[in-house]
Structure formats: C-alpha cells, structure tokens
Amino acid sequence: MQQYTTQMDAAKKGIITEQMKAVAEKENLDVEVIRARVAAGTIAIPANKNHKALDAQGVGQGLRTKINVNLGVSGDLADNEMEWQKVQTAIELGAEAIMDLSNFGKTHAFRKRLIDAAPAMIGTVPVYDVVGYTGKIVNDLTYKDFLAVVEKHAKDGVDFVTIHAGLTRHTAQKVLDNPRQTNVVSRGGSVLFAWMVHTGNENPFFEHYDELLDILARYDVTLSLGDACRPGSIADATDAAQIEELITLGELTRRAWEKNVQVIIEGPGHMALNEIQANMILQKRLCHGAPFYVLGPLVTDIAPGYDHITSAIGGAIAAASGADFLCYVTPAEHLRLPDVQDVREGIIASRIAAHAADIAKGVPGARDWDNAMSRARQEVNWEKMYELAVDPKKAREYHDSSRPAQEDTCTMCGEMCAMKTMNRILSGEAGCVKL
Amino acid sequence: MQQYTTQMDAAKKGIITEQMKAVAEKENLDVEVIRARVAAGTIAIPANKNHKALDAQGVGQGLRTKINVNLGVSGDLADNEMEWQKVQTAIELGAEAIMDLSNFGKTHAFRKRLIDAAPAMIGTVPVYDVVGYTGKIVNDLTYKDFLAVVEKHAKDGVDFVTIHAGLTRHTAQKVLDNPRQTNVVSRGGSVLFAWMVHTGNENPFFEHYDELLDILARYDVTLSLGDACRPGSIADATDAAQIEELITLGELTRRAWEKNVQVIIEGPGHMALNEIQANMILQKRLCHGAPFYVLGPLVTDIAPGYDHITSAIGGAIAAASGADFLCYVTPAEHLRLPDVQDVREGIIASRIAAHAADIAKGVPGARDWDNAMSRARQEVNWEKMYELAVDPKKAREYHDSSRPAQEDTCTMCGEMCAMKTMNRILSGEAGCVKL
C-alpha cells in the first residue's frame, strides 16, 4: 500500500506526506514549498516509521531554527530517573529534538521508553552503544557489529543517527599531518580513530556506506553526518582536517540522496566569532545545501561553567548565517554531566540563540513574539510579560522577590520608570504634550 | 606647574602622561600610538584629577574591550552594604569601570567611598541625582541645577559622566513624529523629556553645552554622551529618533574635542542581531571615530531573567564590529535591581562577550588565554583548567560535584574521554600510530 520509502522518496515522487503537512502548518509555509525542499535535500524531516509518538518537525532552508537536547545513561551517572526528568524538561520547554547518548550497559529500555513517549525527534550516536550492545571490546569489533547496532537503533524508531563516516583513513592522516591543539575531541570519532589504527581497516561506515544507507532507508532514519574533526579549541577551527572531512561529507551527502536517505551535516565546535559566517557558507556550498546542525560554536575556550553562554553567542551567529539546527550546550560542558537545572539553562540559552537568529534571518512571524513582549512592557503589564517570557517562572520569581514601593514598576528604576514617565507625558496627563 | 588640562590637551601638545604610559603597558602598545589616538579622540582615558585610587584604563581604537558594572543606592533598595558587596565583586572580577547610579537621598557618601577605594574608572549619571542633590521636584529645576550636580560629581572625582545632551527639542519631536513601540526607555532621557515638555525649554545640557564642557575640562571628566533614544525594543532599533540623536552626538563630539574634553558615545539597546554591525559603522562614521559604549545590544525582547545572555550575544557581535566598551546586563534586567549573584553573572557574561570579540577583532595576545586553556584540556590537567577559567570557583565546584570512576576524566565522557583516547593513540601506547 505504501507508495514511498522515505520522506525524500515521497517528495521526489510528488507525494505530500502527513509529515510534510505537519511541518508546513507549523512553519506557515505552503506544503509544496516543503515538498520541493525535501526532494532537493535542503529540508530534512527526521521521522522514523516506527516512532509513533512523533510530532514531525522540519530542519532546514527557510524554517525556524530547531534545538536539540543531549541526555542519556552513562557509566558514571546511571540514574534513569534523573535522565527521565531531563526528558520531561526538554519536552516542557519545547525542544524539537532529543539525542539519547546512553552508553552504559543495555541501553534499549531507556531508548524504548523515550521513543514511546516523546513527540520530539529522537537521535542517537550508535557508536556510543556498540560496546554495550555487542559485549565486545573496541578492538574486537567488526564492521558488521557497527552496522548491527545502527540497525537496532533504526528498528527501535530513532529518527536520526550521528554517523562519523567522514573520518576516513585519508582524513585521519590529515589530523596527523596538520598538528592540532586538541586533536580529535569527538567521542565517536576517537573510538573510530582508535579502531582504524588498531585494525588497519578503513572507517567501517565509509567502507560499507551503501549497506548503511540501505538500513537507514528501510526505516527512514535521517543520516546526521558527524564531524569527527570538529575543532575542540578555537586554535583548531577551520583547519585542514576539519575542511577535508567536510569535503567528504559533501560527497557522502550526494550518495545518500541518491538512495533517498535524508541528510543533516554536523558542524563545529570551538570557533572564533569572526570565522563562523565563512564556515556556514562553506558547509552550504560543499554539502549542496543540506541542513546544518551545529554544536555551539563556542566562541572562546576560557569559560567552563558558562559554555551555555559561549555557545549561545556562536549559535546565534551561526543560525543567523545559515545553520538550521542547534545542539544545546549546558553550563556543565567540559566539567561533568549536566543535572536537570543545567539542562534547563542549556535549553533556554539555546532557545534564545535560535530565536535571535530567526529574527535576524527574517523567519516569517519571528518578531511577533518580541513585539507582543515590548507592547506588554510599554503598558507595564507584568502578568502579560511573565506569560510571554521564555521562562515565565523565573521572570515572575525575580520580579516578586524584590517589591518596589510603587507596585506597578520594578525596583530597577522604581518611581523613575521611563515607561511610566513617557506614558504620562504622551497621554497628556502632564498637562502638555507639545514640545 | 601642570603643563596640560586634560589627557586630550596633553596628547595634542605631544605630552606623554602617566596615564598614557599605564594604558600602553596594559595593552602592549607603544605609548606614542596611545598618545596619537587620545589626541585624535579615538581613545579616551577617563581619569579625573581627583580620583587618586584610579588604575587608568583606555577605551577605544585597537584596545581590549572594557566592561562596566552598574550599581548604586536607590529608593527601593537603599542597602549600602549590599551595594558595597557589588563593588567588591566588580573589583574582584576585574571590571574596568563601575557606574554609580545612586539616585536616592544624599548620594555623596557612597560615591566618595567608591572613589576613594576603587581602581576602576567611576562613572555616574548626574541627572539621576539632581532631585536628591537640589531637594527640588523635577519641574522646578533650572539649568543651573543640572550643571551644579555635574560640577559636584566632577569635583568628587568621577571619571566619566553620562549626559543626554543629544535629546534636543528637535530630536524629541522625532520621537513624536515617528511612533515607537517603547518610546523613550532611558531614565535620564525621560526626565529631560518631561522637563522640556513642562518648562518649554531646550535641553539644558545642549543649550548650555559650552558651560558644561568647561566644568568637565577643569577636572578632566570624560563626557559619555548618552543615547536617550536608544531602542527599548527590537522594533524601535535603528529608527529615525535613534539616528537623529546620533547625528547630534557626532556634532557635540567635535565641539567637546575643540575644548579638549574626551568623549565616549553611548549606544543601543535592544536590536536584532543583523542590524548590529551597521550600527557600529554608523556610529564610528557619524561620531568621527569616538569610542563606542554599548548597553547590550539585547538581540531579543523575550528573555527577561536571561538578558545577560541576550546582551552577551549582542555585545560580542557589537565589540567584534567596533564597539569598545560594554555595559554589563544582569539576569535581573527588566525585573528588579540585581543582587550580588546577579552582578556576578552579569560581569562574567559581559567578560565572555568582550573576550570573544577581542579574539575576533585580533587584539594582540587575546588568543593566548584560549591556547593555554586548550593545552590544559589536551593534557587533562584539571588544576590548570580551573586556574585559567573565567570563574575558577564555579569550574572547580562543577567538576568536584560529580566524580567520575576514572579520576582523571570527568563524568561527561568518563572512560570514553576523547582526549585520553587520542593521547594514548598518538603517544604510541596503543602499539601503533601508523594509519
């Protein structure tokens, strides 16, 4: 009965899917625009056929910037309930994607629970799970093991998977030939690097790429091509290894599209502010307009404890310059796994960056939210301000914690409130509005 | 015995002052470069002759981006000791400037204590203090009252004063002719607007500008020309009133320089990310290269409780595009007066923005800090990472709060630490580094 395999296959055949309709409605765009862009690969709609709870979202050209929340069970913090609270926080705050980075023991139960419950797109990095899934040590793994874990995740209903297929032996050699400050900082990338050094083999996902694509096409899993060579310090940004890998990712993108597998490209990382725009242009060109998913960029290395801020700066600039999807970064980055409060702060910082970028890139309707807020400010309407705030709870708590003598102001300016002064003058209450 | 009146007078006469030497040393620049730029007005060294505790800083062309901390005693929060803790926080975290915005009762004692103790540049907004100083209500004030409070602050040793001399009757009319979402949100500006409407007079600082300049020159107070028409919402940014005022500020800049008064220009405000660079170019052109001091810019209106982040995004872009001086914004902005923790978060967010911009604009040595941090990361040297962190205390607390099983990693990746994996491979411990 099904007339298509993947969203991209449908789009190429001119079929409008339910998911395309849902995206068009959310974005206030014509569904034909969505279809054409999915066909061209400039929009991805990660929607595994087995993820029944999904409320489909689009990522890419002309759409609102989306954000992703990382969480998952690990060996050092195997607290399923705490991770579940993070899931609830992500859903409450409207994150469009959740990546389950569980890498400890049998990860299936948590993943299953997540996919059953979450309307957000679910992503994973199957390599994190390969040791737990196969019960082998890294050096004993075969390429079949790597593909088997991908197939397991695909079958479970994961909407997008990060695969570091661009870290070929050729690219790995570039890392050695062009010494870096912080080498390879991608966890998945470093595992593959170690495996290639140990076994002498080519990257399993690169060597057996067609087999990988067949698995992904079967379930309509979107391929998120990982950047193993993303810079881990601003010193390493935009270097030979990073760009070499990006060239390969562009080639792999075309091959995926030929098999109707949707693609997202992952990007940096740590990067000086003035290099971000050039990197967005480079990715869009080399990867043929595929959606760009960035981790940060973090615009300085010196702020552990505040990397939600360093990445909000970089993420806002990246998204304003073309990035489509931001991976959140929490205050805990570089220091520990985030707790629930860290997750909350990370999501809000990321949401602010995405929204600031949407205003800048002229996403239709983006400014409406700001205009409503500034109207509430002009009217000194506190309830309305709370309601419109990105975090209503914090806004209310802050204002309530410090009461002004004049109830309709705040303690910042008190009776010197410029809004009230101007409203009085402009309404003519002061006796004269004439200058 | 003194051969010059102000730093600018000295610079024009070819005299190298102690303050110029101090700035040259801090910035690793030739003192002759500093002198020439002070003479041209593109660098200001706010240094009141009566501020004996000052450790002079330069603001402007080619220098490190500086940050300012606002604090002060107000009617709703007249807690001198809490404000003093904010002073200590600002000094501890190395803020280069502190603005004392006290506006309640007799402000002299707090200002005096601050000037006696602080090595940072001290700024004030004399208009906030005019009611308290004169004991009159706003409508009864004369131009002499406005100048008297400026002279009092100058005599007390304030290094720079914000004066909204650009809000002329002509500019005020532009506000009325070009309706705004949030009218005038500058406290000082709204007081002057009200006074002009009530009395029918011209802006006292504009009408008696030469007299004002004579006072400032006498003590070498730097004139920080306030932007009464700064946008209070992204909808109002870059509008007729804002730009009309900026044109006037440019004209006033030249007149100040003719009298050897140093000038800083104040800027927005709320502003969409994509408008920031154009605003920096416009200010530098219209104000003849005078240093630019920005409040924010806040790149969205919707994040009360997180405006340290919205302004870190805008501030980083602004400073990378030419702004020289960032006024911090705390999480409490738009909601209440900040407490000490808010002040701390505001300073650090602002410091991050300034540093990210310094990297981007190529301030000599700016990257050294990042390189040292990323070396420590590559070596997995935690003590060194804490030491180099913008907030060593928070970095240590975060890492210590969540101990990994492998002591030399962190719980973020644990045994999957990419740094450790790569160090093992590259050192040859894994047996083979050959690909």
Image: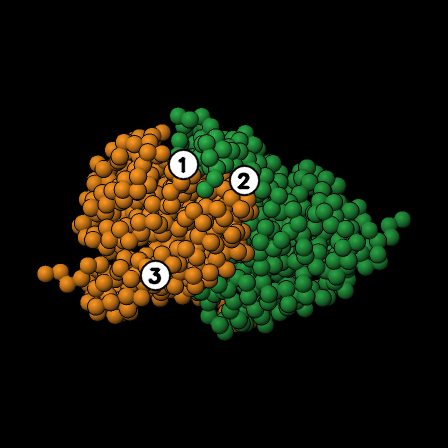
Chain colours: A green, B orange
Are the residues under marks 3 and 2 on the same chain?
A: no
Circle nearer the N terminus (3, 1): 1
Amino acid under disc 1? His
User: Circle 1 is placed at which residue position?
Assistant: B198
- Where residue A249 appears, as percent x and y from the top left, is 64, 65
Provide the secondary structure element on which disc 3 rests: helix
Q: How many angstroms separate mark 3 from mark 1 (CA)?
A: 30 Å
Q: How many angstroms separate mark 2 from mark 1 (CA)?
A: 27 Å
- Between disc 3 and disc 2, the foreground one is 3
User: Circle 2 is placed at which residue position?
Assistant: A374
Q: How many angstroms separate mark 3 from mark 2 (CA)?
A: 35 Å
Q: Identify which residue is drawn at 48% across, 46% down.
A: B173
Name the residue at the right extreme: A1
**Side (left or right) of B267 relative to A216:** left
Are the residues under marks 2 and 1 on the same chain?
A: no
Q: In this view of the protein, which residue sits in the foreground, A57 or B244?
A: B244
Q: Identify which residue is drawn at 25% across, 70% down.
A: B32
Amino acid under disc 2? Ser
User: Circle 3 is placed at which residue position?
Assistant: B254
Near mark 1 (Cα within 10 A), the count class, few <14, some 14-19 or many ≥20, is: some
- Where residue A287 appears, as percent x and y from the top left, is 65, 65
- Between disc 3 and disc 1, the foreground one is 1
Q: Chain of mark 2?
A: A
Amino acid under disc 3? Arg
- Between disc 2 and disc 1, the foreground one is 1
Q: Chain of mark 3?
A: B
Q: Identify which residue is drawn at 40% across, 36% down.
A: B198
Provide the secondary structure element on which disc 1 rests: helix
**Side (left or right) of A252 relative to A334:** right
**Count of numbered tags:** 3
Near mark 2 (Cα within 10 A), the count class, few <14, some 14-19 or many ≥20, is: many
